[in-house]
Image (cartoon, coloured by chain):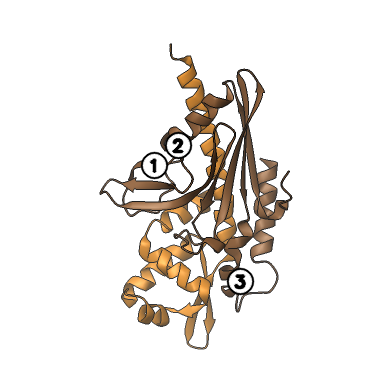
Chain colours: A brown, B orange
Amino acid sequence: MTSTSTETSVRRETEVAVPVERAFAVFTEKFDRIKPREHNLLAVPIAETVFETRVGGSVYDRGEDGSVCRWARVLEFEPPHRFVISWDIDPQWQIESDPDRCSEVEVRFIATGPDRTRVELEHRHLDRHGPGWERGRDGVASEGGWPLYLQRFTELASGA
Amino acid sequence: MATYVDDAWTALGDPSRRQILRRLAERPCSVTEIAEELPISRPAVSQHLRVLKEAGLVLVRPQGTRRIYEVDLQGLATLREELDQFWGRALENFKRLVEEETEQP
């Protein structure tokens, strides 16, 4: 089990009535239809989202004008059990180029029966986005800031 | 709260505004300072700041004769909530898609 503290993670899970192999294949190969379209860092609407299903691949959005935004790197890929991607988007919703300042998302697929799969998603190490944020707090009250809103965020996530 | 989320997302849909917000995250500053450092005209900077302010992403405070803009932490808290909603929606989409595909012969 991961020892990540809840202050720096967001967890979500769902259960679906399909075998684990099928759940994993649909999630990764049809990620284009899973990722909410309104999440877009390009200047134009997204034509498609591509999940390159191998370690070292990327997850990227391709805009209608051909422009590309690579916003995640595939760090681990173990079908049909789990994958881990980086989250290369900073708190100001721009691409983060420093890998040490990126968070990561792990999705685990657990067979709970022959035709049943629990999908557990964890977006963790959110504090890694923090150091740059700390600098932004000069002149702002010392109370609050990153730890406070992460905590609030986590409360909302866990209550959902 | 819901309108703030929508506004923040619309506000950040513009690359110049994202650039300005990133600059403010480094250090609070005035319109003039932003216009000097970024390739954006002073009137355009003012316009962008107005949108960011209305979206709850930046705050303004007077300092002598100048107005200093800074990132509104509460506004960004709203964006963090949006990150949770993002994954919630993704999993809903996934569940719907898997069930649709399974119903096919």
Residue B1 visible in the snapshot? no
Judged from the image, the secondary structure of the residue bearing numbered disc 2 is: helix
Q: Earlier in the sequence, mark 3 or mark 1?
A: 1
Q: Residue at 68% across / 62% down in the picture?
A: A147
Residue named by callout 3 = A134
Residue A70 visible in the snapshot? yes
Q: Residue at 38% across / 53% down in the picture?
A: A69
Residue named by callout 1 = A49
Marker disc for residue A4: none
Q: Are marks 3 and 1 on the same chain?
A: yes
Residue named by callout 2 = A31
What kind of residue is marked 1? Thr
Q: Residue at 65% across / 57% down in the picture?
A: A150
* Chain of the residue where label 1 is placed in the rendered structure: A
Up the image or down, B98 lies above or below A149; here it is above
Which residue is at the far left?
A65
Locate residue B94, reporting x and y percent.
51, 31
What kind of residue is marked 2? Phe
Disc 1 vs disc 2: Cβ atoms closer than 8 Å? yes
